[in-house]
Image: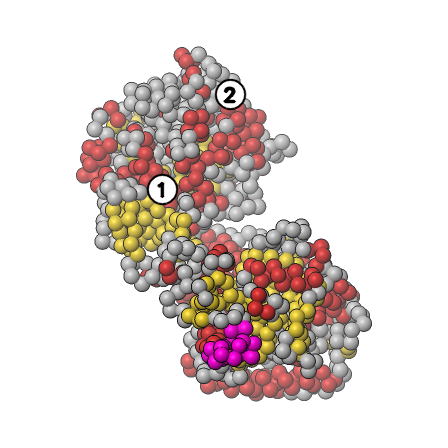
Amino acid sequence: MKRVATQGRTPGRSAPRRPRPAGDPPSFSGGDPLWFKDAVIYEVHVRAFFDGNHDGCGDLAGLTSKLEYIQDLGVNTVWLLPFYPSPGRDDGYDIADYRNIHPAYGTRAEFRAFVREAHRRNLRVITELVLNHTSDAHPWFQAARRAAPGSVKRNYYVWSDSAERYAGTRIIFSDTETSNWAWDEVARAYYWHRFFSHQPDLNFDNPHVLRAMLRVMDLWLRLGVDGFRLDAVPYLVERAGTSNENLRETHEIVRVIRRAIAARHPDRMLLAEANQWPEDVRDYFGDGGDECQMAYHFPLMPRMYMAIAQEDRHPIVEIMEQTPAIPDTCQWAIFLRNHDELTLETVTSRERDYMYQAYAADPRARLNLGIRRRLAPLLENDLERIKLMNSLLLSMPGSPIIYYGDEIGMGDNVYLGDRNGLRTPMQWSFDRNAGFSRADPQQLYLPPIMDPVYGYQAVNVEAQTRDRSSLLNWMKRLLQVRRASQAFGRGTLRFIRPGNRHVLVYLREYGPDTILCVANLSRSAQPVELDLSEHRGAVPVELLGRTSFPPIGEPPYLLTLPGHGFYWFRLSLEAEAPSWHGERSPREDLPVMVLVQGWSSFFPERVAPRRQELAAALRSRLEGHLVPALLARERWAAPAGAGLPGNPPARGAHPGGMGSSRAALADCAMPQRDQDPWMLAIFEVADGALAGRYFAPLAIAFEDSDEARSRKLQPGALARVRQQASLGVLADAGTDEELCRSLVEAIALRSEWPTREGRVVCRPTGALAALRGTPGVEPAVVPAGAQGGNTTVRIGETLFLKICRRLAPGPNPEVEIGRYLTEVAHFPHCAPLAGFIEYRRGDGTSSTLALLEAFIANQGDGWDYTVNHLVRYLEERITRVAPPADAHGLHLALMKTLATRTAELHAALAAPGGDPALAPEPISGDDLAAWYGATREAAAATLETLSERAADLPPPAAREAATLLARRAALLERLAPREGPAPRGIRIRCHGDYHLGQVLLRRNDFVITDFEGAPDQSVAERRHKRSPLTDVAGLLRSFAYARRTALQQCSLIAAEERASWEPQLDEWESQARRVFLATYDEIARGAGLYASFEEMAPLLALFELDAALGDLRRELASRPEWAEVPLRRLSALAP
């Protein structure tokens, strides 16, 4: 059996390993390790791109000078063909020195300059690594042929005394080679070669060979290379009695290479060139992705040509359905053409004959088992077919590769030998030598294309850059569109099969992003009907023109495509349908309300006596039908309940929410009465699940005077309205741009508006002036969605307006605490409060209608950051042989920062400020008794509910429930009233609903938001002073939910395997808790929040237990499948 070693040195002297010089270009270290999934690769030969020193051959200096062109094209990765010293008998793939640059191309210094400039332009660099063979001019081979048989030097290559060894192995270059063995007169033996006879194969059974190649890789990686294309990787090892392809030992070598690179350069990539069927290529990704991150999908390429030739989708659908799944950390590389012949090795013999007939009728275009033509000549320079093929390339699963010159439709020269006809100079302009070089034409390494159709006078970059409709500019647009969605690079593939077989239809789905791709493979126009009912209500937005199409409904969706035409649609739930589309101009099913006098039409006492009956009827419809329907469908009206991010209440009707109740108009403000475009209305529901008061600002917009606003109000429309000849819409105005801007202005002006029962008062804080932005500039208003019982919008880049929908009497805790932290404590790690709007009744009660805060630009919240970190951690544990030494280091460092900010917040809230409602108080024995008593009462009720519903829980949760119920008595005993002194600590006003979703990550720090308190508590309860450890308990509670969410989101872990991965996350949670509590304790004790953590530890356990009981009640009521999370926490906390 072959043994692979990874240590030792090659025979003879070799250059000592050196540290990277200060001037060496760095890689994109620290970035996304899966960067290659979003890669669009541009393949270029150094000698063919641009001649920088005018000697007739392209070079690194010339290539560097043209990086701006490559960047502007829209690709993000450059793949360089071999640039090493070489005799040039196989265009550089016959390497004579792996460690240097071919003198015609430049020097190492110029290579470093190229990589540095590429990285500056955010372009990654992939180079060739020809593992399988060298040139017969390589010093290794020259030493081997002269070394003694059996010696280390001799065994760098594969030798035999007979050409019959490994009989039956196929000959790859059957047009030029008759055997895989060649006789060497010096060695007096045969040497093995799978390719040309001047390219002897290396012997990877010799461990010195692998060690030498690893040193070569490390050299180029230290010079900044981001990845290697492993040329001819299936042929590394030979074994008698096999095909000598894809052997198990070959995969062992690739795994050793991957581990060696990952240990020192974890963000680098390996791309396997394995011209095999998909089921064989799949093995080169390894088990869980431990070999190459990328591999070519060779069989897809010819079948795209076949599909267009046959005008039938079958070849593409068939091969993709035969393609096995690959690890999530891996990616296919797909292409239309490259520097080699269009290989037909992975098609059947019948399919090969068809491809020759369709695309290579001229025998000179055939080479080995392939066709040596570029893309444009293959497709007869048909621009529509070229565009269609590129659309398939850029939308099928994988990272696409574009061969240099194909973006302008370069031609080829079949009269040049071998594959040189595909490797002619890049055509930059119609100047001499195609603008490639200023050398004399006879000095060029190959002549440029000069025929009338594809010649450089007709096809060149300069001309196409000036032509807005050129292929080059079209490619730039298409690449820009692709770059805007990760669904193309990372999404799943799902075919839709319409009755018309000329049309290929598939969905690319990644998270919430769904891209619909439709391609007409026929030369003639084709209609197609698509079953898209699962996306009912979504608006297809055509991506190249950003044009909205009519929304999808239940009937088949009809499209018409021109010959060889295609569409890319994003199926959007947010985009507006075309303005001309009937369903989104006031909908047919909306009732029509006839107004007589603007807003006064709803107030019988404000209109003429003859119209009072009509006004009363309108008021009755508003209160009895329109507003109840609004409350029933909106998320912000859902019954209050605390929860964690990622698990919002479902949008839609709330069963039994309204019952037969009316939503009575309790009060309203209209600053300009009938002339006002809004009515700031407060509605009251007397009973049912939605009982309470709601702030529902309403707007009326007429189409003739404000068509744009009328259209924007459509999603919140309650009814169509008509006043005389004017038609319009009555709608909820919570996200109306003009209302939001006007409320900001009213806060700044300290406006007050009278109502029937009181006043609406607008007040700014001292922070508003600095946040309002440039005077006279109208800020953009961007809806941010519903948060609990609120509607939120971003105003410009500096302000965040929160409209409170479910009203509660009393001072809003977020206003109280926000004003204190902004104007008194000047706490820098919260969103400053800029102002607020209150409704003050004549009886002295008040409710907050809106809050204005600073908008915090951020990198997401702590919840998303933590869940994503855990998903990545799980995937790394699955795909790596050994986990990184400090897998959670960065996350734990941020948790330490979060603990610091949490303790600093509590210290700020504990500081004396003059307001008794916020002043700290010592914890007393009465407080202790009350806390234990309330928790004990909650535990008894919760356990009773659990005993009733335990049988209906999923098995894992049912087992946890049984364990907990068996310990019911011990748990209740633990919660019995305590005797003895209270712990030395204080009670303060706390956050009240603290979890990872309430903190925003910003520049490796955190900003704490949303001081409104728990939504399922009354305002009076939220304003109670508590131990700051209640916030700590809430934060720790979200760790448990984050780990469960990560397990569910990790696509590499099947549902039945999640339990086996729990111990991995147990360790993380323990570390996160330990780091958070240790850091918090140090600062909290120093700030006087308590005297000793040992005294407070039982209290923290009590608060954690209380939080878990609340979670369990909510999960039993709405999500039994999640009950296991609080049950596990309760089992851990119970004695």
What's under tag 1, amino acid-wise?
A: Ser
Asked if residue 60 is among those painted magenta in the image, a careful observer would answer no
Residue at the image position 36 percent from the left and 27 percent from the top: 410
Note whether 888 is above or below 983 in the view shown.
above
Residue in front for this viewpoint, 622 or 1064: 622
Note whether 1077 is above or below 290 in the view shown.
below
- Classed neighbour count for the residue bearing mark 1: other residues with Cα under 10 Å, few (<14), some (14–19), many (≥20): many
Which of disc 2 and disc 1 is earlier in sequence?
Answer: 2
Residues rendered magenta in the picture: 600-617
Q: Which mark is residue 391?
A: 1
Measured Cα–Cα span from mark 1 to mark 2: 33 Å
Disc 1 is placed on an element classified as helix
Note whether 282 is above or below 450 in the view shown.
below
What's under tag 2, amino acid-wise?
A: Gly
- The image quadrant that residue 464 belongs to is top left
Percent across and percent down for residue 722 are: 45, 67
